[in-house]
Image (cartoon, rainbow, N blue to C red):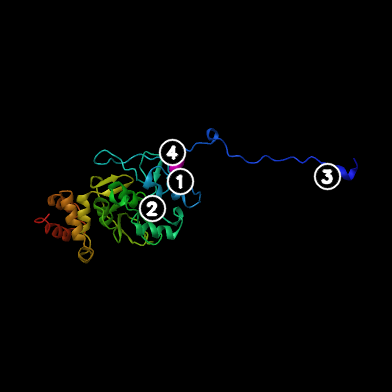
Amino acid sequence: MGVHDRHTEAYQPMLPLWQPPADDERPRSTHDDKRRQPCIDLRKAACFTYDDAGVDGLFPRHDTTRRPHDGTAPDGARSRHMGAGDDDATTQTVLYTYDNLPGPFAMRSLVRAGALVALDERHAYRSADGETLYGRAAIVAAMLPNPQLVACGRAAAWVWLGGEFPSAVDVLSTTHYRAPLMGRPINVRERRVPPKQTQPVGPLTVTTPERTVCDLAMCPPEDIYEQSLDELILQLLRHFSIDIEDCLLILEGCAYLHAAQRAREVIADFACIA
């Protein structure tokens, strides 16, 4: 056989044709494979990853350092939405920005859906957190520039009662803050408040309902009626069954304040309706 004849008869291996595997060799899908959705690994879209918690999977979780729990809930239970003061190593964020959401469109969509409540164009909180005492305390604590500040006035009333977030944040402090808090001015009250008139609620120290009534009554008269602070006073008096005499005793200790006498007259007007 010559050289030219040999290449026509060269061996050419044949690849086997693909055959479907037998039924007993096929991998069987499990119930979890059908239920579990694929994760989308985006740097700012942790809220889209699969979460067995259901609705809570819409929001990312972040690791935080454990801190001692400052207060207990009235029923002895602790809120799982607290931003601080929770014993769990993994807690849920209470203030959301573009940094922990995919972007402005995602935030606007969640606000329209009612999952988030906007504070300004860049900040929002979960509507579910705004419906609990400890959730509201965690929101205010996350907003304050100093964790040692004591919430009073309108901020304290929102923590105790809920509802629409106030247009200004009142705190007890000797330091003045010019920069607004998420579109809201921070009003500093330079007042000496005894420790028994404040109360820790999760990560926040807040004035007691009785002291909050007194602080609201000491606001300027135009603010009391234009901002419906009189309605907040009435709600606090009724919700916590506050005795008017207790408020008047607190105001006696504030005689050094020029607004204390006017506040006594404001609170006395509620004696017959509270």
* Residue matched to label 4: 31
**Distance of label 3 from label 4 (alpha carbons):** 56 Å
The kind of residue on which mark 1 rests is Gln
Q: What element carries label 3?
A: helix
The kind of residue on which mark 2 rests is Leu
Kindly tell me whether residue 4 is visible in this rendering: yes
Which region of the structure is painted magenta?
Answer: 30-38
Q: Give the position of the C terminus as an image quadrant.
A: bottom left
The 10 Å Cα crowd at callout 1, few under 14, some 14 to 19, many 20 or more, is: few
Q: Nearer the viewer, mark 4 or mark 1?
A: 4
* Residue matched to label 1: 37
* Residue matched to label 2: 95
**Distance of label 2 from label 1 (alpha carbons):** 27 Å
In x, y percent, where is residue 226?
Answer: 22, 66
Number of marks in the image?
4
Q: Earlier in the sequence, mark 2 or mark 4?
A: 4
Does residue 193 lie above or below 65 as drawn?
below
